[in-house]
Image (cartoon, grey):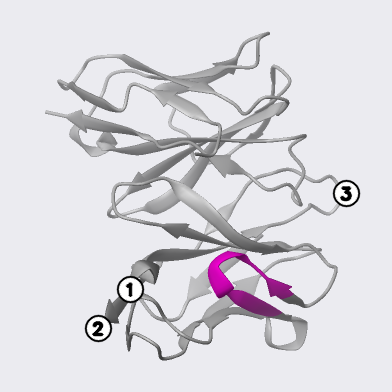
Amino acid sequence: AQSVTQLDSHVSVSEGTPVLLRCNYSSSYSPSLFWYVQHPNKGLQLLLKYTSAATLVKGINGFEAEFKKSETSFHLTKPSAHMSDAAEYFCVVSDSNAGGTSYGKLTFGQGTILTVHP
Amino acid sequence: DSGVTQTPKHLITATGQRVTLRCSPRSGDLSVYWYQQSLDQGLQFLIQYYNGEERAKGNILERFSAQQFPDLHSELNLSSLELGDSALYFCASSVVGRSTDTQYFGPGTRLTVL
């Protein structure tokens, strides 16, 4: 079974300072991991994804995440926050099953609301 | 714009009624997914279709059903609606429906049950 825990429900930073959004996952086999962002009253937009290639993944808008299997973590970072980064962020896992069959079921974390202060 | 379209954007209805939500996937995508986003449950996977066939099922209620048509658009039918069904319903699509696929999300349909 797959699951995701986002360790902070709210994160508040000042513009220009680093962002760290923490995510731990649980999966039985070979997970794919994603970060999606949701701006108010908008749909979900993919920031980046990990699918067993390079463990450091670069995404859009300066975000990146590092897959650490030993720590079962996939934290999202950005060196310098911008006001437009204020949104809700979701860490997401997708797993294959014991038979190696790969479906697309996504399991979402509870979300982290990022607030950016001027 | 993800290329996934959903109609209607908003739907207000009464308890006990039935509604249909519609989704058109991105051009070329064969797999469609439905998700429900509510304040108490968060974002939950409901069901996945691939090229017209049901592929995976999540915590979808028996009062809910879905299908994917030959032109690959999908409909989610919600019946005997309850207050607790009020939520944002997202459709997503991907190329073939593997766990490594990127899923592209539509803007959602906000359902309010009064």
Q: Which residues are magenta?
A: A57-66
Q: Which mark is residue A99?
A: 3
Callout 3, which amino acid? Gly
Q: Which mark is residue A83?
A: 1
Q: Is residue A61 magenta?
A: yes
Q: Element at badge 2?
A: loop
What x and y, as percent, mark residue B91? 50, 33
Q: Does the residue at mark 2 contact the one at mark 1 (Cβ under 8 Å)?
A: yes
Horizontally, residue A13 falls left or right of residue A53, namely left
The one nearer the camera, A32 or B47, is A32
Mark 3 burial class by Cα count in 10 Å: few <14, some 14-19, many 20+: few
Q: Which mark is residue A118?
A: 2
Mark 1 burial class by Cα count in 10 Å: few <14, some 14-19, many 20+: some
Judged by depth in the image, the label closer to the viewer, 1 or 3, is 1
What x and y, as percent, mark residue B45? 52, 43
Q: Element at badge 3?
A: loop
What x and y, as percent, mark residue A73? 64, 81
Residue A60 drawn above or below residue A97: below
Judged by depth in the image, the label closer to the viewer, 2 or 3, is 2
CA distance separating discs 1 and 3: 45 Å
The one nearer the camera, A114 or B57, is A114
